[in-house]
Image (spheres, rainbow, N blue to C red):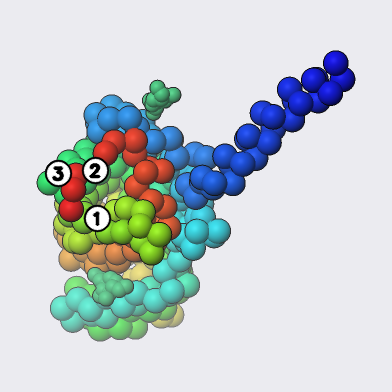
Amino acid sequence: MRVGIVLNLAVPVLATLLVGDCTAKIAPDFIRPCNTTEPACLIKATRDAIPEFSKGLPELGVPALDPFVIDQLPIQLPGIKVTFHEGKATGLRKCEVRNVEAFLEKNIFNLEVKCNITIKGKYTAVGRLLLFPINGEGDSKIKIINSIIALNIKTKYYKDSEGRDHFGIKSYKYTFDYGERIIYTINNLFKGNPELSNTVLQFLNENWRIVTEEFGQPVVDYALNVTISTAKKFFDAVPIDELLYVPIPKY
Ligand SMILES: *[C@@H]1O[C@H](CO)[C@@H](O)[C@H](O)[C@H]1NC(C)=O
Ligand SMILES: *[C@@H]1O[C@H](CO)[C@@H](O)[C@H](O)[C@H]1NC(C)=O
Ligand SMILES: *[C@@H]1O[C@H](CO)[C@@H](O)[C@H](O)[C@H]1NC(C)=O
């Protein structure tokens, strides 16, 4: 009787341990694989994964996306060179997922999100702005409200050394709609002249759309480059069969 009970308990526990060991799962628990590539499921799975994913997965070598660090980002514009440093971008974890599509046969993956992003850090600016010689240095903050980012990724498949299939990223394109408003807070644009600094800053904010068209592209290129290289690290670490319960085409 006693032995029976012990065995009854022990068998499932052992079985769980054994199975757990054989199929040691790499994907974190917040990844809930879809059984189809229906956008409704992909959207929900992506929405559920973003807040945790953006914190980073150090055990898989995946860095954080929120915040992500901008060590040094030089932007050369006509007549003026702006360099960001010691910067931090925040907000990605709260992006609203608008659409996710995966076409496994065609190797296409599309993602559309709406985000509020804040970039904070130090800057230097040397050159000319409007008619004024500029030599600014100080703190800056850029607040991007309700921007829409549509990513179009060309994927590929490959096998790791254990023969498991992975997604690779072959190339990507994106469109970026700056959204409703961008707010610049930049101090000390003109060293020692706070009045002129404020006047020019006000001008930049009143003309944010034009300013951003020149100036925003390199920032967004950089941010998406970081996002894509982070996604690559994740796909290198986690095989497809832990991300999606849908057979992939022969390749
Ligand atoms: C996929 O199917 C399994 C088994 O039917 C189910 O438990 C799971 O919830 C499904 N996954 C999703 C994301 O719907
Ligand atoms: C962005 O911020 C605005 C204003 O604070 C808010 O109304 C909007 O819902 C936010 N958008 C997202 C995608 O979080
Ligand atoms: C993106 O990163 C790669 C390597 O990390 C680099 O070679 C490339 O120039 C970067 N592109 C942009 C637009 O920053």
Element class at badge 1: strand
The reply to whether residue 212 is visible in this rendering is no
Q: In the image, what residue occupies the spot 59% across and 46% down?
A: 21
- Answer yes or no: do the residues labelled 2 and 1 have beta carbons within 8 Å? yes
Pointer 2 or 1: first along the chain: 1
Q: Which mark is residue 105?
A: 3
- Quadrant of residue 50 within the rendered picture: top left
Q: In the image, what residue occupies the spot 61% across and 41% down?
A: 18
Q: CA distance from mark 2 to mark 1?
A: 9 Å
Q: In the image, what residue occupies the spot 52% across and 40% down?
A: 29
Q: Which residue is mark 1?
A: 157
Q: CA distance from mark 3 to mark 2?
A: 8 Å
Q: Which residue is mark 2?
A: 248
Q: Going by the image, does 31 lie left or right of 250?
A: right
Q: In the image, what residue occupies the spot 23% across and 78% down?
A: 76
Q: How crowded is the residue under tag 3: few (<14 C-alpha within 10 Å), some, or many (20+)?
A: few
- Position of the N terminus by quadrant: top right
Element class at badge 2: loop
Residue 110 on image: x %, y % = 21, 44
Q: Which mark is residue 71?
A: none
Q: Is residue 218 positioned above or below 113 on the image? A: below
